[in-house]
Amino acid sequence: MRLRVLWTVSFAALALAGCKKEAPAANDAATTAPATPVVPGMVPGVETPAPAATLDPAQTFANAAAAGDAFEIEISKLAIANGQSAAVKRFANKMIDAHTQSTEKLKLAAGKVSPAITPDASLSDAQKQTRDALKDLKGADFDKAYAKAQVDAHQTTLDAVKAYAASADAPAPLKDFAKALVPIVTAHLNMAKAL
């Protein structure tokens, strides 16, 4: 139950972050209809509440895992191009290989869930900000920021997969996928800490 609340709150926060709308300019006020109060769950022009759009916890987990893999691959490609340290570049190559394999395993597990789900690998705003910040760095500065990003990302992923693997509500294919990831993510976290 706690995991379901966590995933729901996380999704709601992401959904709300993407729903910002700019107010009309002052000179547009005369040409627009009077503002109707916005009531959460209501569809404009309809008097009954619409059901809130929520993702199933399995879909939420699959999306987070897919985004994590995509993020790791993107920033590791940056490490190969912008990094200075041979150790960082070796680690980056390992991350590209490992997260490419993880993506394939995730797709297989998600396809076995009934009904099957398709993971969405869209990066979160925080992942995009980290990736974009890394794009501007080179050499030793890049290496330091990349190592920190790797530690942070793997710690977050480790916490999430442990929680999901322990969830009583998780469908078996994704639960097994999460359990199998725990030692792999732990090893990646330890390698990142050693960079």
Image (cartoon, rainbow, N blue to C red):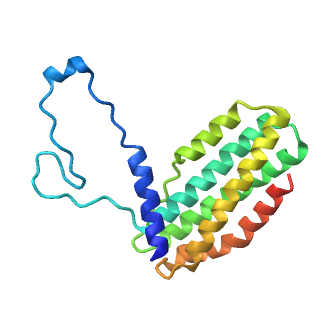
Residue found at the far top of this picture: 27
Determine whether, in the image, residue 177 is placed left or right of residue 19: right
Residue nearest the viewer, comparing 155 with 78: 155
Query: Residue, x 69% and y 61% (percent of image)?
Result: 155
State left or right for residue 152 relative to residue 118.
Answer: right
Q: Quadrant of residue 154?
A: bottom right
Please determine whether, in this image, residue 125 is positioned above or below residue 23.
below
Vertical comparison of 100 with 177: above or below: above
* Quadrant in the picture for the N terminus: bottom left
Q: Nearer the viewer, residue 165 or 119?
A: 165
Residue 17, image x, y percentages: 42, 45
Write down the quadrant of residue 52 in the picture.
Answer: bottom left
146 and 172: which one is in front?
Answer: 146
Say above or below: 7 vs 97. Answer: below
Furthest residue in direction right, as rendered = 86
In the rendering, at what x and y percent does residue 24 appear? 26, 26
Left/right of residue 184 with respect to residue 28 in the rendered view: right
Which residue does the image show at 47% across and 59% down from the upper left? 10
Q: Position of residue 116 (x, y in %)?
A: 43, 68
Q: Residue at 54%, 58% (x, y): give it.
A: 64
* Residue drawn at (63%, 55%) of the image: 69
Please state the total of marks drawn on the protein image.
0
Could you tell me residue 82's position as x and y percent? 78, 34
